[in-house]
Amino acid sequence: MTMRNPEISVIMPVYNAEAYLEEAIDSVLCQSFSNFELLLINDGSTDRSKAIIESYVENEKVRVIENGKNLGLIASLNKGIIAAKGEYLARMDADDVCLPGRFKTQIEFMRANQDIVLTGGSVICHFEDYKVNQYFPLDFNSIKAEALFNCPFSHPTVMVRRSYLVQNGLRYEEAFKYAEDYALWQKIIGNAKACNMPLFFAKYRVLSTGQTGKAINNADERLKIISDIQRIGLERLGIINREYEARLHYQLSLSDRISELSFNEYPVKVIAGYLNKIVGQNYISEYCKPAELKGILGKIWLKVIYINKLKLSFWDMGYMLTSKFFFIGLVWFIKMKIKFFRNRIN
């Protein structure tokens, strides 16, 4: 027996996830909010995942979808969108843990803010031998600015209005494999409002066998895919990059890429000039609030300094430490910390 009118549909694709699957399922079923269905999509698992899924079929909140064979994450997610009965879609991975008050907090927020199409939160990232808190931009303008460089949401924390996806024909796309969520959010925020809440919603496992691990092992393909997604946002500013600038933009987007910067290929004054170009185009296009964009650019500038402090020459370090982006970055960092902890939901 399944629920007739669930308000939330939780989409959880499963592929060979026996090690953590029960914990992931239980973390959803133990939510303080109860009016939801859990769609367990078995994507051709060959381990004990199917047996674990079948042990939950008597639970009225659980619906099982069998792919029959391995179709991949993107196809499974899209099947979930089509099969969902709920007004809201929540994402959950088969190796993560959903924190108890997540659905209650998000559904109350979405009910009260009908103009918001998409919302998410922060995560506690569990690596093999350590863990770290990962924060995401909170307000809409910060999200739009962040999305120019990187995904502004953690996938296993998002909740989205299903009607918006259906009415606009939006789905996860194979063309953006390993970053299909980033591409979808990028398209949504071009026309609809979104935000992140100042609350941790999940414990997120970073495994070499997961999507993130696989993506890292496909560096050339990922460069093209991420650049294509970044281009969607940049074109809203009126920026169409040549290959040289596109590679710089890509390298500025994450810490591991920043560490690979060659200052012979991209001198610090070239980097500063490129960031100033983005600021200028934003004034023209009015894509997002200038202060929020400058804050994101300042954050990137700080990362370049910190990560490459041993590579930078004395003169380059001096230039970077006296740049306006350095001081903007410091102010952004302080404001972000204050904003998160002042607005944190207990």
Image (cartoon, rainbow, N blue to C red):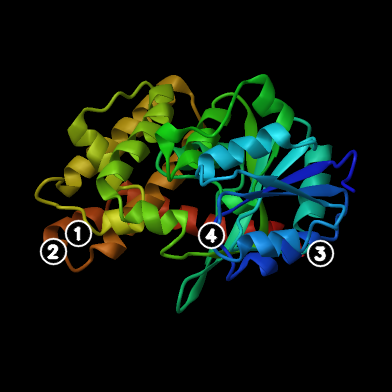
Query: Which label lies toward us, 4 or 3?
Result: 4
Q: Residue at x 43, y 55 (%)?
A: 212
Most foreground residue, 107 or 84 = 84
**Residues at discs 1 and 2 in contact (Cβ within 8 Å):** yes
Query: Can residue 116 be seen by looking at this rendering?
Result: no
Disc 3 target residue: 30
Mark 1–mark 2 Cα distance, whole angstroms, equals 6 Å
Q: Residue at x 58, y 63 (%)?
A: 95
Disc 4 target residue: 46
Mark 4–mark 3 Cα distance, whole angstroms, equals 27 Å
Mark 2–mark 4 Cα distance, whole angstroms, equals 56 Å
Mark 4 lies on a secondary structure that is loop
Disc 1 target residue: 318
Q: Amino acid at mark 4?
A: Thr
Q: Classify residue 191 as left or right of residue 117.
A: left
Query: Which label lies toward us, 1 or 4?
Result: 4
Disc 2 target residue: 314
Query: Which label lies toward us, 3 or 2?
Result: 3
Q: Amino acid at mark 3?
A: Cys
Q: Amino acid at mark 2?
A: Phe
